[in-house]
Image (cartoon, rainbow, N blue to C red):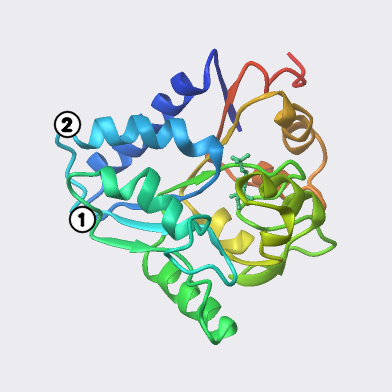
Amino acid sequence: MKIRVFETASQAGLYVATLMEQVILNRESPVLGLATGSTVLPCYKAFIQIANRGLDLSNTVTLNLDEYVGLDSYHEQSYCFFMEENLFSHLSVRPREIHVPFGVSENLSEECKRYDAIIAKYPIDLQLLGIGVNGHIGFNEPDSLLESHTHVVNLTSPTIQSNSRFFRDISQVPQQAITMGVQAILQSKQIVLMAFGEQKADIVARAVKGQVRTDIPASILQLHREVTLVLDEASASLLPN
Ligand code: GLP
């Protein structure tokens, strides 16, 4: 696992945006695995600048990690809305295909199968990840077992609590989400996990330097050959030198 520590989140975001650019320049049909959350915002901001200087995205496919169950694409807190608002609507050339799990499907188990078929069709070249305060990646929550395929997950109370900052009140936070499973994440050719701020320092240290454990889902990234951890000084502060 490579670890890159930057002074600021915006420098870190620029670095990750250039990794995305490299994938797009070097692959005929690039596939980017995208994430949501405040952590990825500096990266998307930098990527918009790079892309709008003339990067050709017309062959690129994007796949998002997850979506809340019950929020449609017009809901301001849906991840579909987040992606439009923070990335896609700013691009002068949109990716050829954009995929986000459909959180208001009437048949969620069919939706999970449909999403797995998309992942199988488009193997991910570069997967971006944030990390939850409890170590979740996507919405793969700490548990005694980690599911390999796309599935519906009951969100844990630390996640609901943490994500409630984006909703009017905590009762509005969906209790469930659809998330890619750990297999799709681990099958990505390259993974970049970003974490910023001191509130992530403890979980970053436990995920990266501790044992691989299902109650710290991000720790499974230790099993992948091509992972880069992109941190700021605060989130790296508890890593041994
Ligand atoms: C959500 C997403 C995760 C993301 C996490 C961290 O729960 N499902 O993919 O990594 O939030 O969010 P933030 O970057 O806002 O700390």
Residue highlighted by disc 1? 59
Label 2's element?
A: loop
Numbered disc total: 2
Q: Position of residue 167 (x, y in %)?
A: 62, 51
Point out the tag, 1 or 2, that comes first from the N-terminus: 2
Label 1's element?
A: loop
Q: Position of residue 21 (x, y in %)?
A: 30, 36
Residue highlighted by disc 2? 53
Image: 77 above or below 176: above
Task: Using the image as rendered, state which of residue 129 and residue 120 is in the foreground.
Answer: 129
Report which quarter residue 202 is drawn in.
Answer: top right
Q: Residue at image x 66%, y 64%? A: 174
Crowd rating for badge 1 (residues with CA inside 10 Å; few <14, some 14–19, many 20+): some
Task: Using the image as rendered, state which of residue 148 and residue 86 is in the foreground.
Answer: 86
Q: Inspect this view and state whether residue 32 appears.
A: no
Image: 209 above or below 112: above
